[in-house]
Amino acid sequence: MTSNIESISKRISKCSNVVLHEYSSKFMPNGFACLRFFSYGSNMNEGKFREDTRRNGYEFGLENVKKGVLKGYKRILGNKSEKHGLAFTICSSERDQVEGICHDVPIKGLNSFLKKEGLLLDEPSYELVIVSVSDQNNPVLTLKGLKPSSLEKLDSGGKLKVYCYVSTTIEGAERWNVDYQDILEIKKALEKKFCR
Protein backbone atom coordinates (compact mmCIF):
# COMPACT_ATOMS: atom_id res chain seq x y z
CA MET A 1 0.00 0.00 0.00
CA THR A 2 1.32 3.44 -0.86
CA SER A 3 2.30 5.90 1.84
CA ASN A 4 -0.50 8.23 0.67
CA ILE A 5 -3.14 5.57 1.33
CA GLU A 6 -1.50 4.71 4.67
CA SER A 7 -1.63 8.38 5.67
CA ILE A 8 -5.28 8.71 4.67
CA SER A 9 -6.29 5.46 6.37
CA LYS A 10 -5.27 6.97 9.73
CA ARG A 11 -7.67 9.89 9.26
CA ILE A 12 -10.88 8.16 8.15
CA SER A 13 -13.45 6.24 10.17
CA LYS A 14 -12.74 2.66 11.22
CA CYS A 15 -15.30 1.27 8.76
CA SER A 16 -13.91 3.27 5.83
CA ASN A 17 -10.38 2.30 6.88
CA VAL A 18 -11.25 -1.41 6.74
CA VAL A 19 -12.86 -0.94 3.32
CA LEU A 20 -9.88 1.03 1.95
CA HIS A 21 -7.43 -1.64 3.16
CA GLU A 22 -9.54 -4.44 1.71
CA TYR A 23 -9.92 -2.68 -1.63
CA SER A 24 -6.25 -1.76 -1.94
CA SER A 25 -5.05 -5.26 -0.99
CA LYS A 26 -7.46 -7.15 -3.26
CA PHE A 27 -7.85 -4.84 -6.24
CA MET A 28 -4.59 -2.86 -6.23
CA PRO A 29 -2.08 -5.64 -5.51
CA ASN A 30 0.65 -4.08 -7.62
CA GLY A 31 0.12 -0.57 -6.31
CA PHE A 32 -1.82 0.86 -9.25
CA ALA A 33 -1.79 4.64 -9.43
CA CYS A 34 -5.58 5.04 -9.03
CA LEU A 35 -8.68 3.72 -7.32
CA ARG A 36 -11.93 3.06 -9.16
CA PHE A 37 -15.08 4.82 -7.90
CA PHE A 38 -18.79 4.71 -8.73
CA SER A 39 -20.40 8.17 -8.59
CA TYR A 40 -24.16 8.68 -8.71
CA GLY A 41 -24.73 12.32 -7.67
CA SER A 42 -23.15 15.68 -8.39
CA ASN A 43 -19.74 14.04 -8.89
CA MET A 44 -21.00 13.18 -12.38
CA ASN A 45 -20.71 16.89 -13.21
CA GLU A 46 -17.19 17.40 -14.58
CA GLY A 47 -16.99 21.14 -13.90
CA LYS A 48 -18.18 20.87 -10.32
CA PHE A 49 -15.96 17.83 -9.69
CA ARG A 50 -12.86 19.61 -10.97
CA GLU A 51 -13.61 22.80 -9.01
CA ASP A 52 -14.28 20.83 -5.80
CA THR A 53 -11.03 18.88 -6.04
CA ARG A 54 -9.09 22.07 -6.80
CA ARG A 55 -10.63 23.79 -3.77
CA ASN A 56 -9.63 20.82 -1.60
CA GLY A 57 -5.96 20.78 -2.47
CA TYR A 58 -5.34 18.81 -5.66
CA GLU A 59 -7.24 19.47 -8.89
CA PHE A 60 -8.17 16.60 -11.18
CA GLY A 61 -11.18 15.75 -13.31
CA LEU A 62 -13.25 12.73 -14.17
CA GLU A 63 -10.83 10.23 -15.69
CA ASN A 64 -11.47 6.97 -17.55
CA VAL A 65 -15.25 7.40 -17.28
CA LYS A 66 -17.67 4.60 -18.08
CA LYS A 67 -21.40 4.53 -17.41
CA GLY A 68 -22.44 1.76 -15.03
CA VAL A 69 -25.39 0.26 -13.17
CA LEU A 70 -25.38 -0.61 -9.48
CA LYS A 71 -28.05 -3.24 -8.85
CA GLY A 72 -29.74 -3.81 -5.51
CA TYR A 73 -29.57 -0.17 -4.46
CA LYS A 74 -31.72 2.93 -4.70
CA ARG A 75 -30.53 6.56 -4.98
CA ILE A 76 -32.18 8.86 -2.45
CA LEU A 77 -31.84 12.53 -1.64
CA GLY A 78 -31.36 12.03 2.05
CA ASN A 79 -27.87 12.79 3.34
CA LYS A 80 -27.40 16.03 5.27
CA SER A 81 -24.97 18.41 3.61
CA GLU A 82 -23.79 21.78 4.89
CA LYS A 83 -22.94 22.95 1.40
CA HIS A 84 -25.96 21.54 -0.49
CA GLY A 85 -28.65 21.22 2.19
CA LEU A 86 -29.08 17.57 1.19
CA ALA A 87 -27.06 15.28 -1.04
CA PHE A 88 -27.66 11.93 -2.67
CA THR A 89 -26.85 8.65 -0.99
CA ILE A 90 -27.66 5.03 -1.74
CA CYS A 91 -29.53 2.45 0.29
CA SER A 92 -30.07 -1.26 -0.22
CA SER A 93 -33.19 -2.01 -2.25
CA GLU A 94 -33.35 -5.46 -3.79
CA ARG A 95 -35.46 -4.62 -6.85
CA ASP A 96 -33.93 -1.25 -7.68
CA GLN A 97 -30.82 -0.04 -9.46
CA VAL A 98 -28.81 3.15 -9.73
CA GLU A 99 -27.19 4.41 -12.90
CA GLY A 100 -24.04 6.46 -12.53
CA ILE A 101 -20.45 6.56 -13.72
CA CYS A 102 -17.30 4.68 -12.81
CA HIS A 103 -14.13 6.76 -12.90
CA ASP A 104 -10.57 6.74 -11.63
CA VAL A 105 -9.37 8.72 -8.63
CA PRO A 106 -5.58 9.02 -8.71
CA ILE A 107 -3.89 8.09 -5.44
CA LYS A 108 -2.22 11.51 -5.36
CA GLY A 109 -5.72 13.08 -5.53
CA LEU A 110 -7.38 10.74 -3.03
CA ASN A 111 -6.95 13.11 -0.08
CA SER A 112 -8.59 15.95 -2.04
CA PHE A 113 -11.46 13.68 -3.12
CA LEU A 114 -12.16 12.28 0.36
CA LYS A 115 -11.85 15.74 1.91
CA LYS A 116 -14.45 17.18 -0.46
CA GLU A 117 -16.78 14.28 0.35
CA GLY A 118 -16.49 14.83 4.10
CA LEU A 119 -14.73 11.57 4.95
CA LEU A 120 -11.91 13.35 6.76
CA LEU A 121 -14.19 15.18 9.23
CA ASP A 122 -14.44 14.19 12.90
CA GLU A 123 -18.04 13.25 12.10
CA PRO A 124 -17.83 12.04 8.48
CA SER A 125 -20.65 12.68 6.01
CA TYR A 126 -20.02 9.48 4.05
CA GLU A 127 -18.25 6.15 4.37
CA LEU A 128 -16.54 3.99 1.78
CA VAL A 129 -18.20 0.79 0.57
CA ILE A 130 -17.17 -1.76 -2.04
CA VAL A 131 -19.79 -2.57 -4.69
CA SER A 132 -20.09 -4.49 -7.95
CA VAL A 133 -21.08 -2.36 -10.93
CA SER A 134 -22.05 -3.59 -14.41
CA ASP A 135 -19.29 -3.69 -17.03
CA GLN A 136 -16.49 -3.39 -14.44
CA ASN A 137 -13.98 -6.23 -14.22
CA ASN A 138 -13.53 -5.74 -10.47
CA PRO A 139 -15.59 -4.29 -7.65
CA VAL A 140 -15.29 -0.52 -7.15
CA LEU A 141 -15.54 1.92 -4.28
CA THR A 142 -18.51 4.18 -3.70
CA LEU A 143 -19.83 6.44 -0.96
CA LYS A 144 -22.77 5.81 1.35
CA GLY A 145 -24.23 8.64 3.44
CA LEU A 146 -23.99 8.70 7.22
CA LYS A 147 -26.19 11.71 8.04
CA PRO A 148 -29.84 10.93 7.22
CA SER A 149 -32.09 13.94 6.77
CA SER A 150 -35.04 15.13 4.67
CA LEU A 151 -36.33 18.14 2.74
CA GLU A 152 -38.90 18.81 5.43
CA LYS A 153 -36.11 19.70 7.86
CA LEU A 154 -34.74 22.44 5.59
CA ASP A 155 -35.65 26.11 5.48
CA SER A 156 -36.26 27.85 2.14
CA GLY A 157 -32.53 28.66 1.75
CA GLY A 158 -31.63 25.02 2.27
CA LYS A 159 -34.23 23.94 -0.28
CA LEU A 160 -32.78 26.38 -2.80
CA LYS A 161 -29.33 24.84 -2.24
CA VAL A 162 -30.84 21.40 -2.84
CA TYR A 163 -32.46 22.63 -6.06
CA CYS A 164 -29.08 23.89 -7.35
CA TYR A 165 -27.40 20.62 -6.30
CA VAL A 166 -30.06 18.52 -8.06
CA SER A 167 -29.79 20.66 -11.22
CA THR A 168 -25.99 20.26 -11.21
CA THR A 169 -26.40 16.49 -10.85
CA ILE A 170 -28.80 16.37 -13.81
CA GLU A 171 -26.29 18.27 -15.99
CA GLY A 172 -23.66 15.66 -15.18
CA ALA A 173 -26.03 12.75 -15.77
CA GLU A 174 -27.01 14.15 -19.17
CA ARG A 175 -23.34 14.51 -20.13
CA TRP A 176 -22.71 10.79 -19.53
CA ASN A 177 -26.11 9.58 -20.79
CA VAL A 178 -27.03 8.29 -17.33
CA ASP A 179 -30.70 7.61 -16.55
CA TYR A 180 -31.75 10.38 -14.16
CA GLN A 181 -35.54 10.01 -14.16
CA ASP A 182 -35.58 9.66 -10.36
CA ILE A 183 -33.56 12.88 -10.01
CA LEU A 184 -35.83 14.72 -12.43
CA GLU A 185 -38.86 13.78 -10.30
CA ILE A 186 -37.15 15.36 -7.29
CA LYS A 187 -36.43 18.51 -9.29
CA LYS A 188 -40.07 18.76 -10.40
CA ALA A 189 -41.27 18.34 -6.81
CA LEU A 190 -38.93 21.12 -5.68
CA GLU A 191 -40.16 23.39 -8.47
CA LYS A 192 -43.77 22.85 -7.36
CA LYS A 193 -42.86 23.89 -3.82
CA PHE A 194 -41.00 27.00 -5.03
CA CYS A 195 -43.73 28.07 -7.45
CA ARG A 196 -46.56 28.09 -4.87
Image: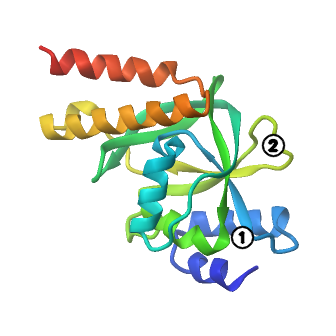
Residue 174 pos. (x, y %)? 53, 28
Tell me which residue sits at (48%, 21%) in the image: 182
Amino acid type for the residue under numbered disc 1: His
Helix, strand or loop under label 2: loop
Q: Residue at x 37, y 22 (%)?
A: 186
Q: Which of label 1 and label 2 is nearer to you? A: 2
Give the label on residue 147, or none: none
Residue hosting label 2: 136
Residues at marks 1 and 2, CA–CA distance in whole angstroms: 20 Å
Residue 79 visible: yes
Residue at 51 percent across and 47 percent down: it is 46
**Mark linked to residue 21:** 1
Is label 1 in a helix, a strand or a loop?
helix
Q: Seen in the image, is 13 located left or right of residue 102?
A: left
Identity of the residue drawn at 30% across and 37% down: 164
Horizontal relation, residue 137 to residue 83: left or right: right
The quarter of the picture where the N terminus appears is bottom right
Q: Amino acid at mark 2?
A: Gln
Tell me residue 135's x, y (percent): 81, 37
Against 117, is 180 above or below?
Answer: above
Q: Position of residue 5 (x, y in %)?
A: 65, 77
- Would you identify the image quadrant in which residue 96 lies? top right
Residues packed near mark 2 inside 10 Å, few (<14), some (14 to 19) or many (20 plus): some
